[in-house]
Image: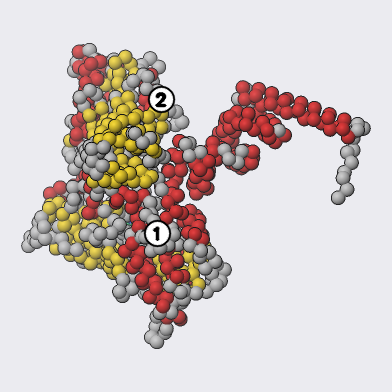
Amino acid sequence: MAEERPVTGRRSGRGRRAGQATSRRDLISRSVHSAEQCLRDHDYGTAYAHFLLVLSLEPELKNHFKESFQYCLLKWAEELYSLNRTQDLFNCYEQALELYPRDDVICNSMGEQLFRLGFREEAAGYFYKALKLNPESANAKENFYRVANWLVERWHFVMLNDKNRNQMYQKAIEKAVRAGCKTVLDIGTGTGILSMFAKTAGAHRVYACDLSRTMYDLACEVVAANQMQGEIQLLHMKSQDIQIPGHIPERVSLVVTETVDAGLFGEGILETLIHAWKYLLLEPKGKGSCCERYGQVIPSGAIVFGMAVECPEIRRHHRVFVNEVAGVKLQEQFSSPVHSTHKTGDAAEPYSTEKMSKIPGGYKALSQPFQALTVDFNNLQDLESIASGKSCQIPVQIHEGGQLDCFITWFVLYLDEENSLSTAPSEETCWEQAVFPIQNLSVASNFVSPGDTAVVNVSCPECYLRLDLVTVSRGANVEHSGAASSETELCDALASLRTGHQEGTKQELCILEPHEIAMLNNILYHESFKAAIGNVISALAPREHWCKYSAYSSPEEYYTEALYVLDVSEGFSILPLIAAQLGKIKSYSSVDEEKHCAALQTLAERNGLAKQSLEFWMNYLDTDDDVLQRPKSDKLWSIIILDVVEPCGLIRQEVMEKAAIARCLLQSGGKILPKAVAIHGMLIESPTLLQECAVQGTEPTLGFNIAPSINRFKVPVHVFLNLSTLPCVALSHPIELLRLDLMDPCSNSVSFANELKVRVCKSGQVTAIPFWYHLHLDEDITLDTSHETSHWKQAAFVLESPLSVQEGEELSLVAHFQSSNVSMTLKRPRQYQHFTTV
Ligand code: 44T
């Protein structure tokens, strides 16, 4: 191509180049100057444009301006986000990543933007990249672990580690393929393991689909890692969207799937298979047809079993059974979201799940197991009839006396005639059971005796398994009408259960999360706070504060000298009512859900609290405001209650930052509750915990190479742990690892570490360090989050690799606290060898 002549320019080539260089340098320095000026003026958009120009003209300056550029980008991105200029926002990041492709801060920030706009899977990719680029980045770590838990649910690890389950599926698939099923579709392939079984067994063509982008990507990686790319055709789609011949060329002779949850149908297997039989499978087996020409499903069917159960742990999470907590009367008006009579949609869940063999406090069977439902996955009519919502009533004989807290269900999954898996509580498996709590029985009728009959209605509305208690008939004396025989009777029976003993009141039920219900039932928690609040108040308030209300001319006058208490607990909390009862106090609740406010208001009235004593703090704030502000321009708080620990067992984000602000809002002598939080932990050996955290080599996955790919999604901190029933051996005594002092004016640092010595009390392999908290409300009052009445679960830090230890030896344990995240390093002090870090 002929070189274009410059249109202008009379100067010689050399002179022109020299001139260009000068003007380029000029341009650069002018732009740098402008960028810096704009930064000072907070004009981030213009500053950003100048920086872009500078860095594309002079890439060598990239290092020099890196931090200013990052700062400018982050600020400009914030502005674009608030202006809803999403496209411009991402364009900026793309330009930035072209300039700094290996910059973890930009990668992580891009991930954060994607995440808050709902692109979680894409976000995960950027967090992962940021973490690879800088393994020390606390922000990238925290972000990645958060999405990893969400993208790849932890049961994937458990299932892949379940060798028995893998072998059963492998045997059933081999048998079907050998018998002639040569075209296979794996629905909900996950990591692709069942597809690889089919291909290895000799299937001619294997198709696999998964609706999750992350699982699809993972399956591609796993299939390639096993040198089977090209042999399994992977589709990122829901099976119901597969079209023939658009996506796959033919109907298949075998569908394999494990899209089942603890309640069997919760992952949509009914809808999935109804569709598959209509559009994706060959005709079902008829007389004389041979395997190559008919369709078949693995699993072939299932039987669901149910059982009536007494279980205090389930009771305390699903039913408020205390009448009074720390002086506050609680008329029953609360309900768990796991409730058969709620309309589906709002807050309702059809069942919860528990591994009953590991439930703290255990459980008692009140009936024999009964057969609740059977399903034939190879029979379209059967699938359709269950999906149509038909129901049946089953009389269940009670053979043990006790409180009827729930029904539980499990199932036997028949893969074929010879191979089956059971999810029964007594089985040594990874499976949880479905739990259907019973809530609105009056307390008296919750007790059942041998000889009673409980009638259960089993149905599948909207394709979710549902068990409802219809009636309990007492031995020979039938108290209720017995089994409802018609639909209307059943509805009446259900309706009367729903209203229960609240007849005559128009009160609306307030739905609380199970941990909130457990908290209401926790008398120790509320009594401890009551005592601690009382101590602060009596230290602060002069005697006349305790004068009777009637000594004042008006409530307004009474409350002019009130002490101010702010409860910033997340979710529902009655601590403001407890505080309000303690004297001349204005209590501010930060609940913001309408129904929660209404419930708290009703409780305040029923407990005879003055109108002025309870306020809803959210009404005083503009929605975007921080909760931590002065109560009034001329007032400060006497007490601020901070919610320090999440129900899952982690420290809440930004606790130290909040404490620092809270300290500035306290009157002299005012207190933050808790004043300090001690993190306790111990060394344990727990193979069970390992199984839940990572796939353990190729052995459980029958030689297929799956672990390295899926283990990228492992996270070092395991949450929602029941420490009291975790199968483990203690290798040290519990020790205090760290202390967060929320009242100490010097403890502003959000990151610090503490090194301690730990003595090994038993030889073994340290695999994890579970941790929990002592919340010090004041000098003498402490709440332990691992207590049996606690509404908190525990967390555990799982070591990268186990550490062999000998009884009597002393190890060095460093506990790090970094922006509310806890991590640990365990090493032998003298060898200076790092065994594990995150
Ligand atoms: N049970 C876990 C396994 N999918 C649940 O995207 C076992 C539960 C469990 N893909 C107690 C114990 C355990 N088309 O990746 C998922 C999901 C995908 C589909 C394409 C469809 N129609 C579907 C439906 C689901 O299938 C994968 C597996 S589903 C869940 C398996 C420890 N409770």
Please tell me the numbered disc located at residue 44.
none
Q: Is residue 88 left or right of residue 776?
A: right
Q: Quadrant of residue 702?
A: bottom left
Upstream in sequence: badge 1 or badge 2: 1
Q: Which residue is mark 1?
A: 698
- The amino acid on which the numbered mark 2 sits, given as a three-letter code, is Ser
Q: Quadrant of ligand 1?
A: bottom left
Q: Secondary structure at mark 2?
A: loop
Query: In this view of the protein, can residue 362 be seen by the observer?
Result: yes
Label 1: few (<14), some (14–19) or many (≥20) C-alpha neighbours in 10 Å: some
Q: Quadrant of residue 658?
A: top left
Which is in the foreground here, disc 1 or disc 2?
1
Q: Is residue 112 above or below residue 201?
A: above
Residue 376 place in picture, x, y as percent = 33, 72
Residue 698 place in picture, x, y as percent = 39, 59
Q: Residue at x 42, y 83 (%)?
A: 290
Q: Residue at x 30, y 36 (%)?
A: 811
Q: Which residue is mark 2?
A: 749
- The outermost residue toward the bottom is 288
> Foreground residue, 657 or 171?
171
